Amino acid sequence: MASVAQEPASREPGGPEGPAQERRALPGWRAVGARLLALREGSIIVITIVTAIYFSVNTSNFFTGENLETLLPYFAPFAILAAGEVFVMILGEIDLSIAGLYLFAPILFYKLNTSVGLSLVPAVIVALLACMAVGAINGVFVSVVGVNSFVVTLGMLFTFEGLSLIISKGTPVATPGGQPPLGTFGKVFGGGTYSELIWAVAIVVILQIVLMFSRWGVYTVAIGSNKLGASEAGVRVNLVMIRNYMLCSLTAGLVGVFEAVRSATVQPNPAGPNEILFLAVAAAVIGGTLLTGGSGTVVGALIGALFLGILKDGLILQGVQATYLLFYTGLAVIVAMTANVFVGRVRRGQTGGG
Amino acid sequence: MTDSDHVHETLERLDYIDRPAADRPGFSRRAFLRRTALTGVAAGSVGGLLSACGTSASSGGGSAGVFGSHPSYKFVFVNHVTTNPFFTPTQNGIADACKLLGCTYQWTGSENSDVSQMVNALNSAVTAKADGIAISLVDLHAFNAPVEKALAAGIPVVAYNADAPANKRLSYSGQDLKLAGEEMGARIIAVVPEGEVGLFIDTPGSANLQPRIEGVEKAVKASGKPITTHSVATGTSIPGEISAIEAYYKSHKSAKGLYSVSGGSTESLAKVMQSLGLRGKVHAGGFDLTEQTIKLLGEGYIDFTIDQQPYLQGFIPTLQLFLYKVSNSQTGIFEANTGLKFVTKETVEPYKAKSRFEGTTATAGVVK
């Protein structure tokens, strides 16, 4: 009898309310720190800041306005790609075809502009619609037909990399609207210094809001957590999945056009995009999206991309040779992600196991 | 400072310059600068001291005296295929020139011809305030604006290995690619009277290969001979290239000649000539000298290969950038054609020795 009465009392200090009350009482930066850690993206934010501080201390040119400009293309394109990928990954699926569409979109854009004679903006819109159509096909194969998403999108990846080579005859061409001096089109679509950053932030904010507050976002998480349950609860699973694949393909095509405008050349070389695909998925996972689905964050993907960007830019600024770059990057990712797990534990501890 | 201090400093500096770690990453520039600052005061006398000691200036440390006092320059080389063995001799050339001149370098860029990555690396080099940049201009458009930006920031930029005519780079060190193609075409015309000729290219359109194939086609067309050329894209991996070349020959058995315009596909072509037993039946030739190409050329599977001296493509740009910096832009920049050297079965012998100049060994010079 006495033991039963004592139990709730003994639980109270360690219970969920305890730390919360304590946190409310704390003034100043500790409160901010605790609030930061309470976010899902908290640990990766901390890791990214630590990485940035490391390079600021060790590399005289890292913490400069000039490097901010240099850093942008190291992460902004990946943030956009990862933002779309997060929507597919939350479903518990994957989309590898983004590398194919990243390559294909600017080539189609070039052809529409030069061979068909569409002006710049309509050509981009048609190219992006084509990408979304490919996304819809991906979605139908995965949801309605039920083919494994890795296989379907791998097939799509090869198909569209191949198609890009066929259409372009393997020859790089000058991006329409991407030649200096840049016009408004070029400045908006990736060529302006801050263009990709602005797009990345806008896309990430919009998609994060969609994910957290819209029915579409809630359904997406529901399908990723329990597909059958979601379906029985009345969610039109196939429609949501197709929509997410279309979104993912759209972001891939968009980034493809941005990068082609930024570098002033449309390169039908599949090797680059394949590496970019890997980095985009890595950014999403590092940012806190589960490969197994059911949970994810678009803002986290942005931070994940930022972490990878800072790492690469910082290592190059430090003077690391190409032969050693992959080695150091690999080690740094492992060390940072191990630290991430520990920071994550602290975070969960502080928020009472939440 | 006493004389013994001078000697001590000089020895320390020589040790430092001769250390094998000079071309390693993680090499601390600050430590180097600190040392240079220590010795810098005595820099002028270092050269004199060296000759006083009977040491030849070319042994490594005397350059500070030769060119007056100057900081340790750092040059960044941006490359399109950083880990490709073709560029091992180029990196050796850079390392050797840096050792000779007392500067440092960074080898960076893309592993797989990704132009966006190369642009990023070029921008990073500008941000890092490199003293000079050398870049392989494998794209005709992508590098024009970034190179102008670097030049505007006061950083000299030179091109090596591949060039883009519209680019504002100060100079180009490498093969005259179109001329090389035309010369190859002349060889083809000389041995093939008529019929089909297969031309193999890794990546059509890339600015380091396309001019060659255009040169070949131009020469063949100008000759007026009834020769039909087919250009075949082979990809960049040796196994893929071998299957592409085999597939071409099996579907064009009447082909009189098979020629490659890139190093990788030349090695693959020689291997196909060997495996299909085509020696003596079909004419063949290509570019560059990989270890396998040298071996198979020696055994007569291909008629010739064209050497473009990749070692010089690292050594010369480093030398140019160094002279440009040390002379305060008065001298150093020149167009350097690193050549068009036909190597045949008769002249391949010297290449069989392992050497740093062909990237077949890391030790200095030629292994005797």
Image (cartoon, helix red, strand yellow):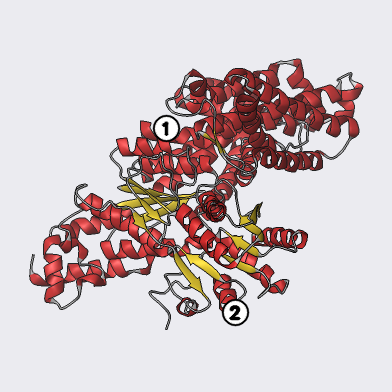
In this view, the residue farthest toward the top is A214
Q: Chain of mark 1?
A: A
Q: Position of residue A88 (x, y in %)?
A: 74, 31
Q: Is residue A180 above or below residue B90?
A: above
Along the line of sight, the residue nearer the viewer: A198 or B306: B306
Q: Position of residue A160 (x, y in %)?
A: 72, 38
Q: Amino acid at mark 1?
A: Leu
Along the line of sight, the residue nearer the viewer: B283 or B120: B283
Q: Is residue A162 above or below residue B74?
A: above
Q: Which residue is mark 1?
A: A68
Residue A249 shows up from this direction: yes
Residue A83 shows up from this direction: no
Is residue A155 found left or right of A322 in the rendered image? right
Q: Amino acid at mark 2?
A: Glu
As drawn, the label of residue B299 is 2
In the image, what residue occupies the spot 71% across and 74% down? B277
